[in-house]
Amino acid sequence: MTEWITGKIIKVKNWTEKLFSIVLHAPIAPFIAGQFAKLRLNIHNVSIQRAYSYVNAPNNKNLEFYLVEAKSGKFSPILRALNPDENILITKYASGSFILNIIPECKNLWMISTGTAIGPREKIINTLYGRIPELIFNGQLENAINLKINPKDTHIMLCGNPNMIRDTYECLNKKYFMVKNYQTSPGHITSELYWK
């Protein structure tokens, strides 16, 4: 059973019209970079929760989460409107296996994301247009960063929209014969699904 604790909002930062982050303090258990927590609020007598990755380092007491506001969403607009000192529920224990210590040794680590997932993407955003699986399949992504995907020395971490994860996995499997990475069976692709 999930153990919930009360956190206190420290600040809400607005980055763009849709992107924002919330910073809170809460007495959570230690977590590993790459894991996520669930946040929960009672809205109109209905308990609503969503999973979000920690953006902060594990030793930082400022727990930060990046979010995209869905204008017709039930949760993100409420989160964006929170004020300092308001309470929010957070899971005491982090979840997820999107962590570096389960990745097999590799020369090149690709971190591919959509939405609020963090990654080095400025050059790609400014030069590429299209869905990630298509950009991989037609070679545009590799050409844009001048690095080839090679199953012998490459590992790929996928984070974001479940459709992107599924379609990118299928593309990598078809084009490069890459397979999913499991703790008991090492592979080339690590991913985390927050929702299906």
Image: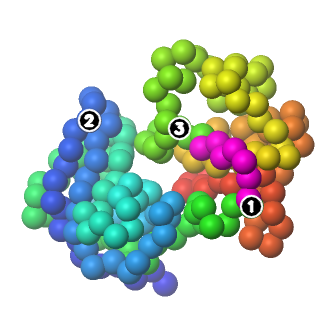
Taking 129 as reference, is 137 left or right? right
Which residue is under mark 2? 15
What residue do we see at 50% from left, 31% from top? 121
Contact flag, marks 3 and 1 (Cβ < 8 Å)? no
- As for residue 106 lying within the magenta part, the answer is yes
Which numbered disc, 3 or 1, marks the residue closer to the eye?
A: 1
Q: Quadrant of residue 173?
A: top right
Decide which of tag 1 and tag 2 comes sooner along the chain.
Answer: 2
Decide which of tag 3 and tag 2 comes sooner along the chain.
Answer: 2
How far separated are the C-alphas under marks 3 and 1? 23 Å
Q: Residues within 10 Å of mark 3 (few under 14, many from 20)?
A: some
Residue 34 placed where, x, y %?
Answer: 51, 60
Q: Element under label 2?
A: loop
Amino acid at pointer 3: Thr
73 above or below 61? above
Which residue is under mark 1? 104
Q: Which label number is shown at residue 114?
A: 3
Residue 164 placed where, x, y %?
Answer: 64, 38
65 above or below 30? above
Residue 148 placed where, x, y %?
Answer: 76, 31
Residue 140 placed where, x, y %?
Answer: 70, 19
What residue do we see at 30% from left, 66% from top? 60
Residue found at the far front of this picture: 107
What residue do we see at 35% from left, 48% from top? 66
Which numbered disc, 1 or 2, marks the residue closer to the eye?
A: 1
Decide which of tag 3 and tag 1 comes sooner along the chain.
Answer: 1
Contact flag, marks 3 and 2 (Cβ < 8 Å)? no
- Range of the magenta residues? 105-111
Amino acid at pointer 2: Trp
From the viewer's side, name the closer residue of 27 and 78. Answer: 27
Q: Quadrant of residue 3?
A: bottom left
